[in-house]
Amino acid sequence: MLHRIETYYDAVPRSAARAEPFGPLTLFVQEGVGWPYYARPALGHAGEVPVAAVEAVRARQRDLGVPEAFEWVAETTPGLRAAVEATGLTVHEHPLMVLEGEPLAVPEPEGVTVRMVGAADPALGSAVAAPFAAFGAEPQPGTTALVSARLAAGLTRLAAALDAGGGALAAGQHQPVGAVSEVVGVGTVPSARRRGLGLAVTAALVADARARGAELVFLTASDADVARLYGRLGFRTVATALIAEAETDGEAETEAGAAGA
């Protein structure tokens, strides 16, 4: 299972980023607008990682003006954490969860419509913006057009919880690659939290992934409390996702973290 997830992690950024090799590490560099990417262990590398390799990647990230960020699975590449920490980065632990069997039913939130959102959908703009609003941010110019193109190409699937006026109160995506898909970027606008919208959106994404042939559906929860919520859908923790980033405001915010919003 972890090998399949690792293979997915190596494949999924390549549709929107270029891969730069740094020995035991691969740096994915975003091409165009969207979430900035990160460095990961090179596919198949499970041994130690020299501190010099981490420093080389960080220097390249600084040159590019992108976050000095690393993401990996503790159980798959245990030798990376010490090297990352030796360069001064703080490592954050997050539950890596896999859906067992078919998803469990969750209550339909009152007063909203939860559905998939298409490339030309009138709700697309607000559905793209909702997870950003969860962190007090706004999408970069061109982000909605990028998501629309990815939806049209089948690279991304988007679900949203819409109010009576058709505006998104919560939204999220799954990114299918073959028979594997990851739920990412689930976020709820602050004014609509604690209504079960994020869980309902996740349920819609899981149902869509299964209907499209995904055998393995997984996600990264932001913390143990959020992991317990996802447990209500049938997800269980199978490993630990590690995220390290040079922090500027005391808190690392990444796409994986947004998945637990």
Image: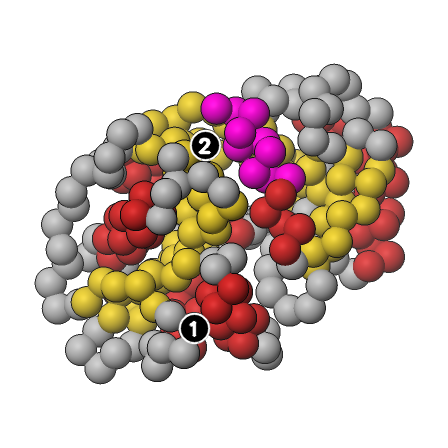
Q: Measuring from the top left, give residue 134's x and y in whole percent.
A: 41, 62
Q: Main secondary structure of the magenta part?
A: helix
Left or right, 91 with respect to 24, comes to left
Left or right, 230 with respect to 173, comes to left
Q: Quadrant of residue 86?
A: top right
Q: Measuring from the top left, give residue 24's x and y in whole percent.
A: 79, 29
Q: Quadrant of residue 112?
A: bottom left
Residue 189 against residue 142 in the figure, above or below: above
**Amino acid under disc 1:** Ala
Q: Residue at x 74, y 17 (%)?
A: 47
Q: Residue at x 71, y 63 (%)?
A: 31
Nearer to us in this view, 144 or 208 = 208
Left or right, 108 with respect to 226, comes to left
Q: How is colour applied across the structure in the image?
A: secondary structure
SS of the residue under disc 1: loop
Q: Is residue 248 magenta?
A: no
**Can you tell which mark lies on residue 96?**
2
For disc 1, the marked residue is 119
Label 2 Cα crowd, 10 Å radius (few <14 / some 14-19 / many 20+): many
SS of the residue under disc 2: strand
**Amino acid under disc 2:** Leu
Write down the region rendered in magenta.
1-10
Label 1 Cα crowd, 10 Å radius (few <14 / some 14-19 / many 20+): many
Q: Is residue 222 visible?
A: no
Q: Residue at x 41, y 78 (%)?
A: 120
Q: Residue at x 19, y 67 (%)?
A: 113
